[in-house]
Amino acid sequence: MKNKIFIACDTSSISKAKKILALPKTKKVEIGYKFGMEFFYSEHGRKFISKLKNKTIWLDLKLLDIPNTVVSSINSLRDLKNVKYITVHASGGLEMMRKAKKTAKKVNKKLKIIGVTVLTSFNSKSFKKIGFKKSISEIVIQQAKLIKAAGLDGIVCSGHEVKKIKKICNRMDIITPGIRLKGDPQQDQKRVMTPKIAFKNGSTSIVIGRSITKGNIKNNFKKLIHSLN
């Protein structure tokens, strides 16, 4: 199975999204595109996504609410037949995730539900500030067990937790955000990693945004592919 790279289309600009989607194909890795809240909630974002063809599309909404609201939200996306992945947040609990998965099967048999663990913008200090007594690693492991129990198709976790998560979710997609090319600034991300190390640790897919989309997109993409050699 080829390694998969999701390029984060973190923009509200249709023209910028088109430039990102124009990346050349490569035999080395499989390329997908992640659209988050910024693009989806923009004036023409949803309509633009609905018209995309022959692309692997991930709708990263990180759904987190009571089970009934999450079910209704997934039902409201049934017209987006080209979307392959949708994220829900593990903090919503086992019941919410189970119902999200059950609903997805009814909406589109090919739709995969991915569980998000602790965001990569957290470090130990900021994590404690919101009231957690356990470490990030302990919480991610606990969330991974819930995600697996809920029957979800994959898990999102930082590269720092992948080795431990792989023991729990060894047959699931393990998607790693917070990816930076060597020497690039971390910005608001705290638990970051290079693409090569993330794949070496066991990630089946990585998510990379600003290291590719800031500046010359095609040149940055070439650097990314070169970094995997």
Image: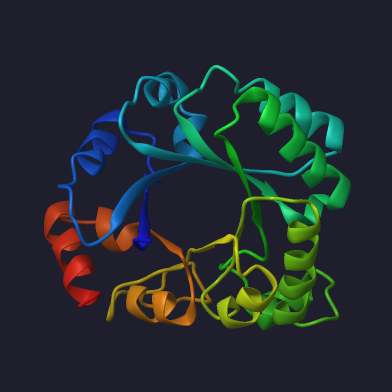
Where is residue 139 drawn, in percent x and y?
77, 73
Closest to the observer: 12 or 67?
67
Looking at the rendered structure, the number of numbered marks drawn on it comes to 0
Where is residue 34 drawn, in percent x and y?
43, 45
- Residue 104 is left or right of residue 67, and the answer is left
User: Is residue 84 in view from this perspective?
Assistant: yes
- Residue 170 is left or right of residue 221, and the answer is right
Residue at x-position 18% and y-position 62%: 220
Q: Which colour style is shown?
A: rainbow
Residue at x-position 35% and y-position 71%: 180
> From what the image shows, is residue 218 above or below residue 120?
above
Closest to the observer: 70 or 163?
163
Where is residue 77 drawn, in percent x and y?
60, 23
Residue at x-position 80% and y-position 71%: 142
Residue at x-position 86% and y-position 38%: 66
- Residue 16 is left or right of residue 72, and the answer is left
> From what the image shows, is residue 27 above or below residue 136?
above
Image quadrant of residue 226? bottom left
Closest to the observer: 215 or 116?
116
> From what the image shows, is residue 125 above or below residue 13?
below
Quarter of the image for the C terminus: give it. Answer: bottom left
User: Is residue 193 in view from this perspective?
Assistant: no
Where is residue 53 drawn, in percent x and y?
32, 26
Quarter of the image for the N terminus: give it. Answer: bottom left
